[in-house]
Amino acid sequence: MSVQATDPALGRLVPDRLREKGEIVIATDASYAPMEFKDAQGQIVGVDIDLGRAIAARLGLAARFQDARFDGILAGVKAGKYDLSISDFVATKERQKVVDMVTYLSSGQAIAVRSGNPDGVDPRLLCGVRVAVQSATVAADEIKESRNPKCEAAGKAPIPGGGDKYDLQTQVTAAVAAGRASAMIADEVIVDYAVKQSGGRLERLGAPYNHAPTAIVVPKGDGELTRAVQGAVQGMIDDGSYGRILQKWGVESSGVTRAVINGATS
C-alpha cells in the first residue's frame, strides 16, 4: 500500500493502479553517469535516481528503478512495462507523438576526444571522423539528420556508418578512450563527467551546442499521472529540494525554473 504523500493534493492525482500497489516502476539506463549509473556495490545511483525517489515520495509512492537499454525504454513505457522513465531523455516533438514528457533539466550536446586531440578532430562537422554514440539518442539522430547531410553537401566524406553505435554510454566512452573512435557526442553533463573520471585520457572539444529540455517520460494520455509528476517537480523547484539534488551531483548549471508538460522545442 502507498504511504502518506508529502503533497496530498498531488497524491490524489495518482491513478488507482499505482496507489494500490504503492510503488512506481521507473525505467532508467544505468550507464549514463552522473545521471544514472551503478556504484561500487551495484546499486543504481545518480541525479535522476535522487529526483525519482523524491518525486515518488511526494506522490505517496515508493520508487522502483529498473535498469533498461535506452533504445527500448520508450516502447516499454508505451506498452505499460514501466510506469514512467527518468533517463536523461531530450524532449523532442517526435518523441512527444508517442509519450508525454515533463521537462526538468536543460542542457546541450558536447564532443569529447582523447586528450590532446591526437587525431586532429574539427568539431564543426566531424566529416570522415569515426564518432561513437549511444543508439537511439539525439546524438545518433544528429549524425544522420544534420552532420552527414552537411558533409555530403560540402563534398566531404560523411561520418562512417552514421556513427559507431553502442548499446551503453559506458561503451561509447571506452571506445574513445581506447582509440577505437576519434570522438564521441553525448549530453554535455555526461561528457563533462566522463572527462573528470577519465584520469586525463579525455577532454571536451569546443563548447556545448543545441541546448534543449530534458524530460521525464510518462505514458501518452495518462493525464493525471503526468500532472502529478509535473506538480512534484515544480514543487521541488519551488522549495529548493530540486536545487540541492542538482548541487549534490554538480549539475546545477542544467537546472530550470519551470517544469513543463510536452515542452519540446524541436
Image (cartoon, rainbow, N blue to C red):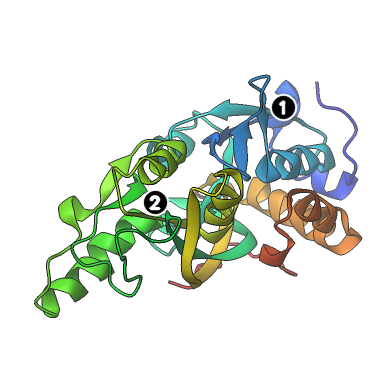
Image location (x, y in percent) of residue 11: 81, 42
Q: Residue at x 31, y 65 (%)?
A: 121
For residue 155, above or below residue 247: below
Circle 2 — which element? loop
Q: Quadrant of the C terminus?
A: bottom left
Image location (x, y in percent) of residue 22: 75, 25
Residue 93: mark in rendering: none
148 left or right of 35 in image: left
Amino acid on which disc 2 is placed: Thr
Circle 1 — which element? strand
Pick whichever, 111 or 88, lies toward us. 111
List the residue tagged with mark 1: 23
User: Which sits earlier in the primary sequence, circle 2 or circle 1?
Assistant: 1
| Discs 2, 1 touching: Cβ within 8 Å | no
Pick whichever, 175 or 161, lies toward us. 175
| Mark 2 to mark 1 CA distance (whole Å) | 28 Å
Pick whichever, 71 or 187, lies toward us. 187
Image location (x, y in percent) of residue 38: 61, 29
Could you say which quadrant of the image residue 259 lies in? bottom right
Amino acid on which disc 1 is placed: Glu
240 left or right of 221 in image: right
List the residue tagged with mark 2: 137
